[in-house]
Amino acid sequence: MDFGPFLLLAVMEGLVSAAVLALTASGLSLVFGIMRVVNVAHGEFFMLGAVLAWFVSQFVPGPAALSFALALILCPLVVGLLAAIADWAVLKRLNYEPEATIVATIGILYILQQAALSLFGPDARPVPAPVDFRVQLPWFGYAGYKLVVVAAAAMILTLLWVVLSRSRAGLIMRATQEDRDMARAFGINVDRVYAGVFALGAALAAMAAVLVVPITQAHYLMGGDPLLLSFITVIIGGLGSLRGTLIAAIVIGLTDGIVSTFFAPTLARIVATLAVALILVVRPQGLFGRTAP
Amino acid sequence: MTARILWTHVGALAALLAAHVLLPAYHHGNLARIMVLAIYATGYNIAFGYTGLLSLGHALFFGAGLYAAGLTAYYTGLPGWLALLAGPVAGGAVALALGSFALRTAGVAFMIVTLMFAQAFHLAILYLGRWTRGDEGLVIARASRQLFGLDLADGSVRFLVAWALFALTMVAALIIARSGLGRVMVAMRENEERSRMLGYDPYMTKLIALGLSGAMSGLAGGAYALLFGYVGASLASVQYSILPLLYVLLGGAGTVLGPLIGTVAMFYLIDLASNVTDAHQLVTGAALVLLILFAPRGILGSIRDRFARWIP
Amino acid sequence: MKRDDLKVTPTRRDVLKGLGATGAIALGGLSARYAQAQSAEPIRIGFQLHRTGIGASYGRWYERTATAALKVLNDQGGINGRPVEILFEDDGTDPRRGAEVVEKLVMQARCDVVMGTLFSHVVMGSAPRAGELRVPYLVCSEGHHVASGALNRWVLQPGITDVKSQVQSMAPFVTQNLGRKVTMVFPDYAFGHDHRDFFTAAVAAQGGEVIKHIAIPPTETSFTRYFPQIPRETEVLYHVMVGPSVLTFVKELGEFYGSGARPQLFGFIDSLEAVAIDSPGLEFLEGSHFWEGHPRYRQDDAGEHEDLYRAAVGVDANGASVTDPRDVSTYSHMFSVWETLFILKRAMEAAEYRGPADRQAVVEAMEAMTEFPEGLEHPQGPKLFNGRTHQAFGLQSISQVRNGRLVRVHRTAMEDGFYPDEVDYTTMSF
């Protein structure tokens, strides 16, 4: 294949990765930025979204598009609710102590993974795409649904952006992020804000998973990679900066797509991994962090 | 060093040694493994528990020791003690090299930088599959697992060697914790800015701590390769960076005996849970959540807070 | 079945209940039973099971197959007239836990032998411990690790052909029927490297050529970006992937080529074990060829033993569970558990096995075996066993996807899979 089409394919693939990563990472970014909690179970919320989408696709009759639309609304709600319960039952009682929450969220990870294994099973299961068309380019074919994923992710992220920057809820979140005690002094119910943020973070991960599951299938161990990647994205972007997270997701998604298209894949991945480390050595606050943490 | 501190730790080592004669065969074998993993956790605790360096990349140091010792034993005819020594040397050297620039970062950036290097190492093991056999790994022949004429594959020898190495590590950790260096390390953890104003060099202190931590982790890796005869990429995966963190937090960060206690607790949590139910991860997960809810400073850390403030 | 309880003092209540062993035993009769003659004491087989972790799809079916085989075995009168029990223990598909599980099964549960491991890294991690404990360790892994000489005298693989032999025996069919210019896509770790090395050599020996190797990094979840590397002149695309994202691989391949010209596809069914071949997105596989260890769909010429085996394990004619048609089996691998159990029976009877002191005799008896004829005990087909390399050799199938089903179009000859011995375990000490 010639260089031009080759590059086009790499960019398209990179955009899909970036879109999914941006959604997942923005969820982690909120939790990490506002609550200062390293949520090791974030990837499992992602996995739950995909697994629940499979259940919806199995038990809701009618066209694939309908059950998919339902899954896209229902799964994030259920996962968000679960996350809120985890926050209320565990994290709040630990007073969000950073180290204790690591152990607690590892515990939650085990519980969610086992629940998925016991109730969903160990097999990878496909979920039909809501739209099924192929874009035939002169050099190669491409799944139309992947383009839908990019568009949908962009819409959801725009919505998130508007909510955070324009609405009262967003203002309260930002106030809590700036200074938890001050926010409390102004009468903000910080507990409720935290539960809401934790739920929103998990819901975003679940939403990303529902979008991507027709491409990849649901599997009970699928949470590991999204966790690592979004964690990296959030830090590279700069802690507490949603804009940074989004830009980092696009940069990481695109480079991953392009680099692994052109070079020996495993070697490329080694180089990319070291590059991330070096960026942080040079700019420990991340690309868009305000000051060094 | 006060007498009760001394006797607590001597007593712990003596109890482990007594276990050699007292424990049934199965638990005897388990304890040998646990002590090797506890060396790793003790090493992790030097960096994390005392100095406050939250690394997510210690699998790199453990893996460096594992492969240094394992590949030496597998490919060369060098004597066992040299292969074993290669473990801490590699672990320490890699830690110093990584630390020399990773320590320019702190906090979450440090977590990611260490994580990334460990991931790159893990991928490199897979990439160099011609020599490492990647994920499948290598089995080290019994003949290459000799230490001064002792057969490391023998249950008793293995236990005693594991005990000796653990004792060495624990005593070293105790000495470090009680030394001037240890106090500076804790000062870094508590308030880096103030200790800088008092004239300490944070960078050097942290580098030394990371080097020591890496050497202990490498020792654990090397010991694992030679005592258990298997070297594989899964032992250098991200899971093995999380494990010592979990052991240390469970046992009590910044305590000398905490890493051992945490390792024992986690090992038997998994082992016993799988006797109770197929869904054993559920039990393990729930136990972790409950443990941390009721002992947020870890098992020994919580005991120290409530009953015995003198525990180092 | 309920999982078996491992305790320091073994109570066999759960075990017997689970195994459906005949005869209700009064719960209070524990001491009375111990007083019975030694010869009535059950033989205990430890089973290292991938119940969790990446191998869980396989593990579930290995457990079902083992349980079914055990029932047949016990109905036949057990081994040497003694009843047999299997104790399953989860290894999390992890090599370190694998070694610990071997220890647990042998030292705590007092098992006579250990068997059943599939994933190669778990075999590698566990084998040293089995050798040190001097316990026969019968793996069902298809890895080349046993026959390569990497392990020890206590490790044998009598129930399934190793990957080197499998791969090599595919080459004549591929080069004669599908094409001579091959591009290989494989995962970039040991299992994939075995395919790369053995198949490349075998194709060259047949006068063909592998023109491109495409190694996919582990944990990759999207593959489209690798397809442009497939050279235009490729006649056959050889693909072998494992792990949960294999479905994606095939789907994306279909999207990439679409209805346009594409190379012939030849894959290892490992990619699609436990996955329905008529899943949405897999239509692209229609007409392509697969290696199968044991045809998943009941073939028209299936014999009586094949049907008995299917019925016993609970697999329907499409290779799925009789109770849930969505629950597809790992048919090309799980027969090895069944066959290994019956080989163990033969070896234990030949060695007149009484207790752990006779473990060495079991290995020696197995090493002396040469042939396993097709039958109820070997439903996959006849096998030859090489006692020096501890490895079995059997017949492989090549199936074509026709109307969403796998139909066998070729069966290899035994000689296709032979290669010179790389080790002689019988000269090693125990």
Image (cartoon, helix red, strand yellow):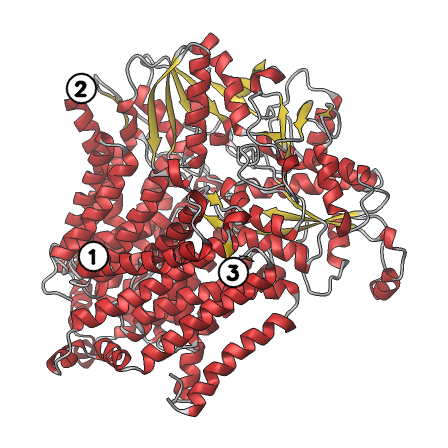
Q: What amino acid does circle 3 point to?
A: Leu
Say if labels 2 and 1 share a chain.
yes
Q: Which mark is residue C167?
A: none
C41 left or right of B110? right
Residue C388 image position (x, y, % from top left): 64, 31
Q: Are marks 2 and 3 on the same chain?
A: no
* Residue C278 falls left or right of residue B104: right
Foreground mark, 1 or 3, reads 1
Mark 2 is surrounded, within 10 Å at the Cα level, by few (under 14), some (14 to 19) or many (20 or more) other residues, namely few
Q: Are marks 1 and 3 on the same chain?
A: no
Please give the residue where the numbered disc 3 appears in the rendered image.
B282
**Dots 1 and 3: beta carbons under 8 Å?**
no
Q: Amino acid at mark 2?
A: Asp
Chain letter for mark 2, please: A
The N terminus of chain B lies in which quarter of the figure?
A: bottom left
- The quarter of the picture where residue C321 lies is top right
Disc 2 to disc 1, C-alpha distance: 36 Å
The C terminus of chain B - image quarter = bottom left
Q: Report the Cα–Cα distance between label 2 and label 3.
A: 52 Å
Q: Secondary structure at mark 1?
A: helix
- Which is more toward the observer, A97 or B4? B4
Q: State the residue position of label 2.
A: A2
Image location of residue A47, percent across then percent down: 39, 49
